[in-house]
């Protein structure tokens, strides 16, 4: 964190000195979370751009005014669905940089021009052809089934994802989520804790509501803070037969169930729809038959689930958990409850997160741009009278029409600047919506392939979203990020807020204005093609005012 504040400066304020002064009491230090939304490959690539901007290993990211080091300063990095693919790929490849994942050789990771239906081009690490690709996936899932564990389409989906996202033979078939905790970088706290999110689906339920139990996977545990279950089990022992929170003396511990691809697939079961297209010409006939049989067995109601058996929370929370008496726990895509940004793990009071950088690549509008729906869903859940929020607090969020009408989805916006206006100790949320800077990054959620050029341009666009075009839209942006990071710490230490931070908060904090009228079709042009987007109105007003004063001096 000292390194971050060494190159991200706040005018007339020594941030490094401040960190040194307050660090004797660690509770005074800023606690940072980063959340990457769902949205398929769009979310992966746009989110990758933001992470690239935040990573001090990215070339030139630690130059004056750049945001490199924010990633290393963060305590948590959460991903959901497509964002889970990004987080999983980074961590299962030993906390790789985005630059190293942007490969250009056949058979390497992130070669998205090769559709997941076709499999990777062969080289020494990956497989040779599509037939072998599908055979390997089928054999891997059959092995799990033969060992006595129920399987679902998510098993196939997770294996297919791994070939694109994990740089190892057969997509790292033996790589587990819990193995992240064994790496030296994790043990030495050189990386944030990764968290992936999935929703629970109750027995016989078709639609996932805002009351759904939200589960998380971190390298140590799987479980939920929600009052329906409020329990965790060691993630490395998923697949073991827990009863009422304990492993009976006559049961053995199971390991390996937490396959990295399966965990990533669980968070993105919505994309089982990819594999449900069984008439695609790329699919071998024997696999079409396999999937057809699976679908007939599951029925339409169960095509989007990941099956966790035995249920790790069997006979646990009997009075509150709808799944307590079920031997199987069904999990679905973490965005099915509309909370498409994984904020839930980061607003838990136990984690004391001060600021969340929320990277939103949702496809809320007709043309696949975000309009704040994910923030609205989390805010509304925190107010739910059923108690599902379980003591969590979240800043006030306006409706989706206001997001569009007020341009809150065209630029970064801070929510929760005044902590006294929240119902409890809520974090400051720095909202970073997908927006076209150098390319139209609003590709369809279900597009299965992207050229290297398109991949790189969307990643670059995500970088520009996080840095506001390398500060071109606002020369003070990096300082404003630093102010957001320090805001709650300033409150705890009764520190006078620097003047530059006050300017930043005036510029970026939502001021409570609402405009719920129908905004019509939202279809932005790129920043560098539209002068109206080039400089924020508040920045322009500040500059204009200064020029007016100068003219009369």
Image: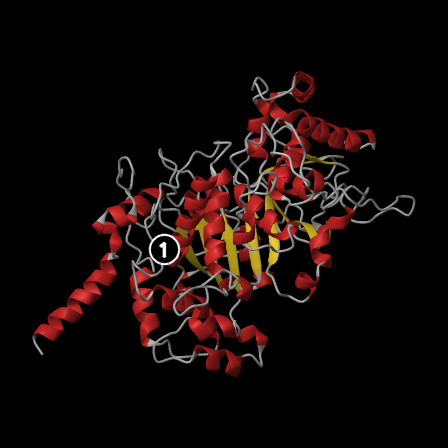
Q: Quadrant of residue 442?
A: top left
Q: Residue 246 in the image: x percent, y percent?
A: 82, 49
Residue at image position (66%, 16%) is 285
Callout 1: 10 Å neighbours few (<14), some, many (20+)?
many
- Residue 224 higher or lower than 123, as above or below: below
Q: Residue 236 in the image: x percent, y percent?
A: 76, 49
Residue at image position (45%, 58%) is 53
Image side of residue 205 versus residue 210, left or right: right
Instruction: Kindly identify which residue carries mark 1.
Output: 412
* Whether residue 152 can be seen here: no
Residue at the outermost left position: 552
Q: Residue 269 in the image: x percent, y percent?
A: 59, 34
* Whether residue 40 can be seen here: yes
**Which quadrant of the figure contains the C terminus?**
bottom left
Disc count in the image?
A: 1
Q: 432 or 93: which is nearer to us?
A: 93
Image side of residue 288 versus residue 38, left or right: right
Q: 511 or 441: which is nearer to us?
A: 441
User: Quick one: SS at disc 1?
Assistant: loop
Residue at image position (45%, 70%) is 486
Q: Quadrant of residue 495?
A: bottom left
Residue at the outermost right position: 250
């Amino acid at each position: 964190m000292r390194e971050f504040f060494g190159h991200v400066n706040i005018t007339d304020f020594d941030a490094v000195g401040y960190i040194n002064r307050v660090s004797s009491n660690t509770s005074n230090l800023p606690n940072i979370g980063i959340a990457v939304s769902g949205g398929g490959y769009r979310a992966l690539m746009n989110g990758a751009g933001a992470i690239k901007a935040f990573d001090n290993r990215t070339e030139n990211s630690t130059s004056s005014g750049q945001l490199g080091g924010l990633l290393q300063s963060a305590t948590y990095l959460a991903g959901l669905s497509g964002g889970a693919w990004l987080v999983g790929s980074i961590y299962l490849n030993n906390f790789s940089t985005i630059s190293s994942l942007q490969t250009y050789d056949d058979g390497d990771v992130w070669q998205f021009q090769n559709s997941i239906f076709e499999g990777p081009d062969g080289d020494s690490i990956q497989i040779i052809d599509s037939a072998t690709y599908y055979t390997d996936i089928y054999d891997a899932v059959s092995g799990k089934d033969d060992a006595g564990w129920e399987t679902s389409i998510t098993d196939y989906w997770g294996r297919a994802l791994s070939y694109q996202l994990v740089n190892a033979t057969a997509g790292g078939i033996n790589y587990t989520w819990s193995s992240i905790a064994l790496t030296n970088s994790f043990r030495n706290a050189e990386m944030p804790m990764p968290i992936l999110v999935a929703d629970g689906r109750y027995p016989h339920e078709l639609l996932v509501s805002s009351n759904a139990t939200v589960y998380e996977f971190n390298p140590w545990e799987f479980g939920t803070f929600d009052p329906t279950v409020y329990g965790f089990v060691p993630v490395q022992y998923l697949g073991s037969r827990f009863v009422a929170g304990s492993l009976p003396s006559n049961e053995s511990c199971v390991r390996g169930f937490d396959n990295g691809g399966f965990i990533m697939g669980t968070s993105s079961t919505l994309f089982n729809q990819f594999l449900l297209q069984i008439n695609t010409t790329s699919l071998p006939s024997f696999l079409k038959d396999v999937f057809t049989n699976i679908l007939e067995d599951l029925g339409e109601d169960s095509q989007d689930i990941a099956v966790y058996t035995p249920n790790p929370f069997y006979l646990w929370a009997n009075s509150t958990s709808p799944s307590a008496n079920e031997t199987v726990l069904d999990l679905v895509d973490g965005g099915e409850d509309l909370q498409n940004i994984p904020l839930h793990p980061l607003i838990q009071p136990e984690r004391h997160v001060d600021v969340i950088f929320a990277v939103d690549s949702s496809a809320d509008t007709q043309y696949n741009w975000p309009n704040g729906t994910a923030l609205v869903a989390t805010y509304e859940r925190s107010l739910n009278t059923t108690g599902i929020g379980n003591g969590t607090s979240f800043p006030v969020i306006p409706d989706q029409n206001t997001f569009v009408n007020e341009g809150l989805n065209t630029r970064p916006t801070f929510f929760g600047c005044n902590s006294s206006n929240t119902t409890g100790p809520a974090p400051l949320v720095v909202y970073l919506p997908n927006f076209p800077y150098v390319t139209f990054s609003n590709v369809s959620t279900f597009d299965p392939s992207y050229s290297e050029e398109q991949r790189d341009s969307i990643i670059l666009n995500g970088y520009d979203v996080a840095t506001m075009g390398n500060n071109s839209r606002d020369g003070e942006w990096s300082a404003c990020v630093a102010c957001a990071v320090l805001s709650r710490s300033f409150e705890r230490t009764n520190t006078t807020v620097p003047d530059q931070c006050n300017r930043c908060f005036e510029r970026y904090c939502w001021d409570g204005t609402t405009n719920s009228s129908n905004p019509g079709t939202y279809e932005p042009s790129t920043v560098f093609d539209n002068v109206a987007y080039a400089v924020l109105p508040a920045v322009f007003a500040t500059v204009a005012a200064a020029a007016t004063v100068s003219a009369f001096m």
